[in-house]
Image: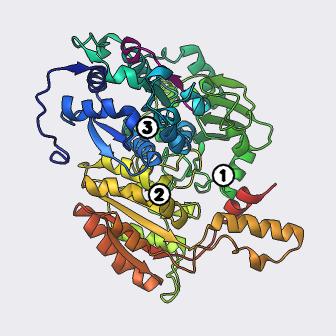
Amino acid sequence: MTEIDRPEPSGHETLYGSDALAEMLRSLGVPFVALNPGSSFRGLHDSLVNHLGNRDPQILLCLHEEHAVAIAHGWAKVTGKPLAVILHANVGLMHAAMALYNAWCDRVPMLVLGATGPVDAAKRRPWIDWLHTSRDQGAIVRPYVKWDDQPASLEASLSAMMRAARITATAPMAPTYVCFDVTVQEAPLDAMPVLPAPDRHAPARFPEVAAADVATLLDMLRAAERPVFLMGRMSREQADWDRRVALAEHFGARVVTDIKTAAAFPPQHPLHAGVPGYFPSPGAKQAMEEADLIVSFDFVDPAGTMGPGDRKVALVSLDPLLQNGWSLDHQALPPSDLNLLADPDAVVAALCASAGVGAPEATIPAPDRSPDPAPDRPIPIPALADALADAAGEDVTWLRVPLSWDGAKCGWRGPMDYLGYDGGAGIASGPGMSVGAALALNGSGRLPLAVLGDGDFVMGATAIWTAARHDVPLLIVVANNRSYFNDEVHQERVARDRGRPVANKHVGQAIADPDIDIAALARAQGAVGLGPAMTAGEVPALLADAVAQARAGCVVVADIRVASGYSEEMSEGMTEG
């Protein structure tokens, strides 16, 4: 990436307000800034190129504002750190709104910058500046960003950037948004102002977990005969992973995880209850029904997951600090006998230290293989999972899996093995998030592998152009059932409930006639496009080729035609009610 978009030296002498904004962005340490160009921040764009030389940060040109946010989202899922995004005025912010909602629901950090036409109406160009100016631009996304500001001066703008960077990186994390006036960007300066110093604005630190709280939770665990841990939004650190496993082994606690969040505990561990899913599996439900204590470690929707029952409940999460009256992503209110406003991994570490918990001991087996599929038929999802595991080998980060994924195939053995879904269930997020995660993994030796649905991929396909342009290795496998199948399941449920023909469920859902050439769509973005593999017999050779080219440094998209179907609990969870 070092040779891409390296500008000619400018030799400029006059300084502008946007030069100071660019210097501030550099001082915050963000390596990249994802953007789709726009006139409202033309001054800042010029400063990134001609004042900073397009390095530290380097521009990631995106073909849509939604992709820019999704790329920063994927980066944060790997690193836990914010990337910078710049959005063009109100129009770009509206384009990006869905991706920002995903990032909010997924609790990831992101430094989002925007711009508005001149607030002073006398300075607006006819027509276009009026269209790109709004009275309170942050109102568009305020319910699902952590903090926003529209400063009116350069000094206030620099201070707002510092504040936004610190707020977004403080748990519980979520995007922040700062909107710059065009006039502030384009005003000449006599000298570079003094910038707020990051080392004089220390990140906020939470207090240590209280010993009394640790003692109370330990007493509850020691008294429990059938404890269950719900492991949710946890860190990507190996030491934290090892402590979580060791703590469960020490107390003999059953563990429930899901596919919505990143890997937090090995699903093949003997203590894992059922299999991960978007909704609880029968094994997970049984463990929770039999539990006399449930401890939720920042689990998404603990109330809906636990269901009713007479047992003690302990909640460990910082999430209440973000809950508001507009977004209902906080889910139903769970009951609790102990409610700790604390980082879940910090509590796990404190419990392990206090109880003398050592290293994990269990051997983690690989997932069982499915029966060999019929070679002349589209491949079922469980068999695709087996074929991918065979082809990909070791050191793989599964960036994403589709709604139809079989939880029994989740063979995660470490915190970087799986990164989870998108937070807000917003279709079109998969390609951009995959690019951002692959960028963060570049040079790590791990293969970034995303399995996306065809609807998700087609909506966001142009995001992969950014990966191709910057030579970021990535493998996307499209599990292509040629349908918005999730909605077919809903239409089937409605038809059955109303006594109407189930055979019509595909109408207005099937992505066919004409068929979409997904491999050609990938090639149009500069990626390697392979397939379609129409039958299970064609899949192994195609995947071997795809993995080899991705490991060699290419962006690869493989089109695999899969058999349609969901697990019973997935179908029930999506449609009941």
Q: Judge from the rendering whether residue 193 lies leftward or rightward of residue 531; answer left or right.
A: left
Residue 511: % across, % down: 58, 73
Residue 14 is one of the magenta-drawn residues: no
Q: Amino acid at mark 2?
A: Gly
Pick whichever of labels 1 and 3 is earlier in the sequence: 3
Mark-to-mark CA distance, 2 and 1: 34 Å
Which of label 3 and label 2 is nearer to you? Answer: 3
Q: Amino acid at mark 1?
A: Ala
> What residue span does the magenta drawing correspond to?
144-157
Would you place residue 485 above or below residue 199 in this image? below
Q: Which residue is mark 3?
A: 87
Which residue is nearer to you in this view: 222 or 530? 530
Residue sitting at 28 percent across and 26 percent down?
22
Pick whichever of labels 2 and 1 is earlier in the sequence: 1
Mark-to-mark CA distance, 1 and 3: 42 Å
Residue 30: % across, % down: 31, 31
* Occupied quadrant, residue 395: bottom left
Residue 151: % across, % down: 46, 17
Mark 3, residues whose alpha carbon is within 10 Å: few (<14), some, or many (≥20)?
many
Residue 156 is one of the magenta-drawn residues: yes
In the image, which disc is placed on residue 460?
Answer: 2
Would you place residue 82 above or below residue 497 in this image? above
- Inspect this view and state whether residue 386 appears: yes
Which of label 1 and label 3 is nearer to you? Answer: 3
